[in-house]
Every structure is written in structure tokens, then in C-alpha cells.
Image (cartoon, helix red, strand yellow):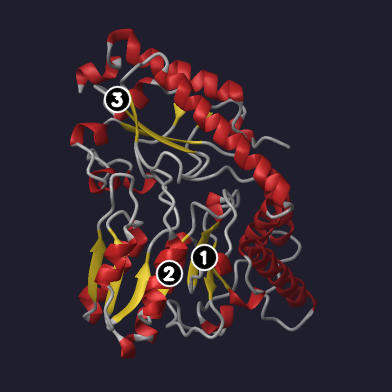
């Protein structure tokens, strides 16, 4: 499998939850639609029909990956676009039956901001459910929060910082029992673990291209057959009338091919999952062994993504540690919060002390992670910690 050029000579990349490198096979699949196959999919001539067929093929591939019908897939501009269409679209289209929304304290900012906009602009009421020390929503809390006025519940499938996986099926069943719609942002799970909308029992599900080896700027939304949504973009009838605008054929082809690569065989997916879990646990061991008693796991020990390790190292600022180890590309938390010198809101909502939240590293692996990468990254990080007790750059902070 060809390694992307950007990974060849750079730092060890341990930030796959922020974005994945684009698979070279995906690049090759979409390039013709930037050059020779330039037609508008709505045009009724040879150029348009070629583009239209490519979009239809990609739609079928994404549908196959998440176990739904092709006509239930709407292409969007990315995960935040899908979240907005799902929540705003469902809330406004079904406000005749209620104006109450429910989410969780550790939800993605796109969900939180969309619900807040519905509160400010349209008079909706929003409930934010707490999470436990692992980042899990208690189904009893959701059941208690649901009312006859609840119209949409949105709980992400897995958290991008800790990897904690929520009991979506149980939560969706509770919402449906009270007549509410259920949306889950599966950006971090599609392509990492098997995801079936039928098994999850959801009405709406978000897919993000750049989390599954496709380019940025493309996503998809699963919309259960027959479910009405208010469009987020008005105009033509593209995407079943739910998101107007001429389709970005090249990027749609890209996410379709990325989905097809992921869905090739269940055995291949299981093998990749086992490899990622082994490397993740090896990295954890390589950090804890030279730093006994100082490395603390954040998130659920077992119900989490196979590629995700979030740990705090006692007495160390994560930002200073990463600054002192430029040979490792990782994150101190969600990439959506990078640049903010504040502890992660996700970890704080889980009840972690401020110092522990500030010392948290998010180390996430992917398709091109290797054993030598793990050895190199662990050595660099632990050396920076143990050389003087804290990274040199921290003494100037």
C-alpha cells in the first residue's frame, strides 16, 4: 500500500482523529473528475451523464459502507455541514410536534452551536446531558430528560478526543419511545469500526470524508427514508432537494472510493482494527513503562476506538511537551479547540481536575502507523519528560 508523500519524511503522525492523510488510491480515483470528466451532473448530455453516473456510484458506495439504501445518502460539504442539516433540518421541519432538543456536554461544537442557534433564533429549548468519568451518557439521564415536546436528540457515536463509544442503540430506542428523532455524528467511527444505521437504529447519521482517507470539504448525511428536512442551502433540486448547489463531483468520487476501500471485506476491516488496537496499546505501554505512576488514561478503558489513546502525564503541560518534541505530530485535545490555552471542555465535563486536563495528550493512529513509529514517538515523548522532569520549553512558560 503506497504511503502518502506527506508522511515520508515528516514527524511521526499521531493525529489521525484530526484528519487522515488522503489515500493515494483515492487521489487517483478523483483526479479524472477534475480534468476530463468536468460535466455538470444535472446536464442531459454525455458529459453530464458521465458525472451523474459517478455521483450515483459514489452514493451507492457510501450507502453500502453504513448499511443503508443509496437514496438515503445526501452529500454535504463535510461533517459540520451534515450536523447542521440533520439538526436544523429536522428541528424546523418537525417543530409542529415539539421545540425541545437534547444533546450531551461533550458533543461536537457543530452540534452544540446549531442547537444554540435554534435556541436564539427560533425559540427552541436545549438540554445538555452530563457524562460520567469515562465520557459516557447515562441512558437513565436521557430517559429523564425526554418529554413529549422533544423533537431531536443528538449524541455522537464516539468522541474524537477520548475515543469513548456511546451506547447509541439504547439511547436511540429511548428517544423513539417518546417520539423524538435521533441523530448521531459518526465522523470518528465510520472507517474505524463497523457502522450500520440499521444496528444503531438512528434516523440521521453524519459521515466525514477527511476522517476516512478522503479530502477535506466532503461529507455525507444518512437520512432515513421518508424523513422531511428543511434544507440548509436553497436553490435547485440537488441532493433530493435537501442541499442545493451543483455537486462537487471530484470530491464525491473521492469519498465514494474511500468508502469502497474501507468496505472491501469484513476480514480486512477486522485485521486493520486489531492492528490499530495492538499499536495503540503498545504506545500506552511504551509511555507508562519509563514513567511509572505518572501516565493516566482518559476515556473508557475498553469501550473506545481502537486507534485512540488519550493520556495525561502528571506534572507536564501537554502543550509544552509537544512543543519540545517536534518529531511527533499529535494534539492536546480536539483539533477544533487547538490554539486555545484552556483545558479541554470534554475532559473538564468528564470531571477531570484542571491540571490533569491540561496535561492530556491525544495520540491517534491510522492506516500508515507502524511499530517503528510507535517506538520513535514514545522515545521522543518520554525523553522530553524525563530529561529534566519537564520539557525545556516549559521553563519559559
Residue pointed to by mark 3? 320
* Mark toward the start of the polypeptide (2 vs 3): 2
Residue at the extreme bottom of the image, as rendered: 96
Please state the horizontal and vertical placement of residue 268, each as a whole percent of the image.
71, 45
Which one is in front, 126 or 198?
198
Please state the horizontal and vertical placement of residue 226, each as a whole percent of the image.
54, 86
- Label 3: element kind: helix
Query: In the visual, does 265 lie left or right of 331?
Result: right
- Label 2: element kind: helix
Residue pointed to by mark 2? 172
Residue at the extreme right of the image, as rendered: 46
> What quarter of the picture does the C terminus occupy?
top left
Residue 173, placed above or below residue 104: below
Quarter where residue 18 is shown:
top left
Circles 2 and 3: CB atoms closer than 8 Å: no
Circles 2 and 1: CB atoms closer than 8 Å: yes
Which one is in front, 249 or 203?
203
Residue pointed to by mark 1? 200
- Label 1: element kind: helix
Estimate the spatial distance between the alpha carbons at disc 1 and disc 3, rounded to whole Å.
Answer: 40 Å
Amino acid at each position: 500500500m503506497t504511503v502518502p508523500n506527506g508522511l515520508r519524511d515528516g514527524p511521526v503522525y499521531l493525529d489521525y482523529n484530526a484528519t487522515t492523510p488522503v489515500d493515494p488510491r483515492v487521489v487517483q480515483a478523483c483526479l479524472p473528475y477534475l480534468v476530463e470528466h468536468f460535466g455538470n451532473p444535472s446536464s442531459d448530455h454525455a458529459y453530464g451523464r458521465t458525472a451523474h453516473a459517478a455521483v450515483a456510484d459514489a452514493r451507492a458506495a457510501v450507502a453500502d459502507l453504513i448499511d443503508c439504501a443509496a437514496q438515503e445518502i445526501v452529500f454535504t460539504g463535510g461533517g459540520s455541514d451534515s450536523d447542521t442539516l440533520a439538526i436544523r433540518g429536522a428541528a424546523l421541519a418537525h417543530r409542529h410536534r415539539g421545540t425541545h432538543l437534547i444533546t450531551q456536554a461533550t458533543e461536537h461544537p457543530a452540534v452544540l452551536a446549531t442547537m444554540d442557534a435554534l435556541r436564539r433564533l427560533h425559540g427552541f429549548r436545549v438540554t445538555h446531558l452530563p457524562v460520567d468519568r469515562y465520557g459516557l451518557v447515562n441512558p437513565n439521564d436521557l430517559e429523564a430528560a425526554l418529554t413529549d415536546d422533544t423533537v431531536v436528540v443528538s449524541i455522537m457515536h464516539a468522541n474524537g478526543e477520548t475515543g469513548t463509544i456511546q451506547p447509541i442503540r439504547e439511547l436511540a430506542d429511548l428517544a423513539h419511545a417518546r417520539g423524538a428523532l435521533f441523530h448521531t455524528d459518526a465522523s470518528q467511527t465510520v472507517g474505524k469500526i463497523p457502522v450500520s444505521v440499521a444496528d444503531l437504529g438512528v434516523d440521521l447519521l453524519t459521515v466525514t470524508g477527511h476522517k476516512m482517507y478522503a479530502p477535506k470539504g466532503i461529507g455525507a448525511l444518512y437520512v432515513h427514508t421518508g424523513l422531511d428536512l428543511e434544507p440548509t442551502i436553497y436553490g435547485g433540486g440537488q441532493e433530493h432537494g435537501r442541499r442545493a448547489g451543483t455537486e462537487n463531483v471530484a470530491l464525491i468520487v473521492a469519498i465514494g472510493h474511500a468508502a469502497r476501500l474501507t468496505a472491501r471485506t469484513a476480514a480486512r476491516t477486522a485485521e486493520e482494527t486489531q492492528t490499530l488496537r495492538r499499536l495503540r496499546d503498545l504506545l500506552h505501554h511504551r509511555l507508562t513503562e519509563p514513567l511509572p505512576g505518572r501516565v493516566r488514561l482518559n476515556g473508557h478503558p475498553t469501550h473506545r476506538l481502537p486507534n485512540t489513546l488519550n493520556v495525561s502525564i502528571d506534572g507536564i503541560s501537554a502543550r509544552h511537551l509537544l512543543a519540545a518534541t517536534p518529531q511527533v505530530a499529535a494534539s492536546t485535545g480536539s483539533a477544533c479547540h487547538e490554539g486555545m490555552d484552556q483545558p479541554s471542555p470534554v475532559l473538564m465535563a468528564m470531571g477531570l481536575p484542571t491540571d490533569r486536563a491540561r496535561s492530556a495528550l491525544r495520540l491517534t493512529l491510522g492506516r500508515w502507523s507502524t511499530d517503528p513509529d510507535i517506538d520513535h514517538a514514545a522515545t521522543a515523548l518520554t525523553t522530553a519528560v524525563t530529561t529534566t522532569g519537564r520539557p525545556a520549553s516549559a521553563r519559559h512558560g
